[in-house]
């Protein structure tokens, strides 16, 4: 199989996840226009679920597919961030109507985004472990053991769980607010 360009190695998986996310977004918020309550509930449940899954779990597919197509590790990791970063940017854009640019940019550090990034690394580590035998058979696999991927999974999961377990997530949110107040004052 001829080697694909870096763009082609990541374009299809990233595009698929991004398109599912976009379609789910419009389907979910468009379901408000449906006057039949039963159909509205079905559409909202379906599109809300696919919206969540594509953002929260799309990294598994993007990473695995990109690596199986020969993408370098760094490129596959960067590709995993396209859809979640677009979602985060949409949320930052939404608050730009009422907050200055610096405050909006600070919103990227909110606890939900930190948890999402932590879980993305868990997913990438798991995907790496899953595709490892396939890559080895193709002669593309890493020479070492699965230690690095396992370390990424364990450390990222520990960060995500610790941040939530530490006061059920309230403490990390208090730190986020404390940082906001230190940088921007108490707000409105």
Image (tube, rainbow, N blue to C red):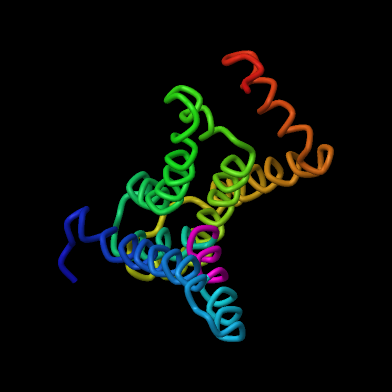
Quadrant in which the N terminus is drawn: bottom left
Quadrant in which the C terminus is drawn: top right
Nearer-the-camera pick, 173 or 12: 173
Task: Name the outermost residue toward the right.
Answer: 167
Residue 151 lies in quadrant: top right
Q: Residue at x 46, y 42 (%)?
A: 94
Residue 17 lies in quadrant: bottom left
Q: Is residue 59 left or right of residue 23?
A: right
Q: Where is 187 relative to 86, above or below? A: above
Q: Reply yes or no: does residue 53 show up in magenta.
A: yes
Q: Reply yes or no: does residue 13 show up in magenta.
A: no
Nearer-the-camera pick, 28 or 136: 28
Q: Is residue 165 left or right of residue 70?
A: right
Q: Which residues are magenta?
A: 48-56
Q: Residue at x 50, y 65 (%)?
A: 51
The image position of residue 120, as x and y in percent, is 54, 51
Q: Is residue 5 left or right of residue 102?
A: left
Q: Residue at x 51, y 35 (%)?
A: 108
Nearer-the-camera pick, 120 or 185: 185
The image position of residue 58, as x and y in percent, is 47, 62
The image position of residue 75, as x and y in percent, is 32, 47
Residue 27 lies in quadrant: bottom left
The image position of residue 24, as x and y in percent, is 45, 69
């Amino acid at each position: 199989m001829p080697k694909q360009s870096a763009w082609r190695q990541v374009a299809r998986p990233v595009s698929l996840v991004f398109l599912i996310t976009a379609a789910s977004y419009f389907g979910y918020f468009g379901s408000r226009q449906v006057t039949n309550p039963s159909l509205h509930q079905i559409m909202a449940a379906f599109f809300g679920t696919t919206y969540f899954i594509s953002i929260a779990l799309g990294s598994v597919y993007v990473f695995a597919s990109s690596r199986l197509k020969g993408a370098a590790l760094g490129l596959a990791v960067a590709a995993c961030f396209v859809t979640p970063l677009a979602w985060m940017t949409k949320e930052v854009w939404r608050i730009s109507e009422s907050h200055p640019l610096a405050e909006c940019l600070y919103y990227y550090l909110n606890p939900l985004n930190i948890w999402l990034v932590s879980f993305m690394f868990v997913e990438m580590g798991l995907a790496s472990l899953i595709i490892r035998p396939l890559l080895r058979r193709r002669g593309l696999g890493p020479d070492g053991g699965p230690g690095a991927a396992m370390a990424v999974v364990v450390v990222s999961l520990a960060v995500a769980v610790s941040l939530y377990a530490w006061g059920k997530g309230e403490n990390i949110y208090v730190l986020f607010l404390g940082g906001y107040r230190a940088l921007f004052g108490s707000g409105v």
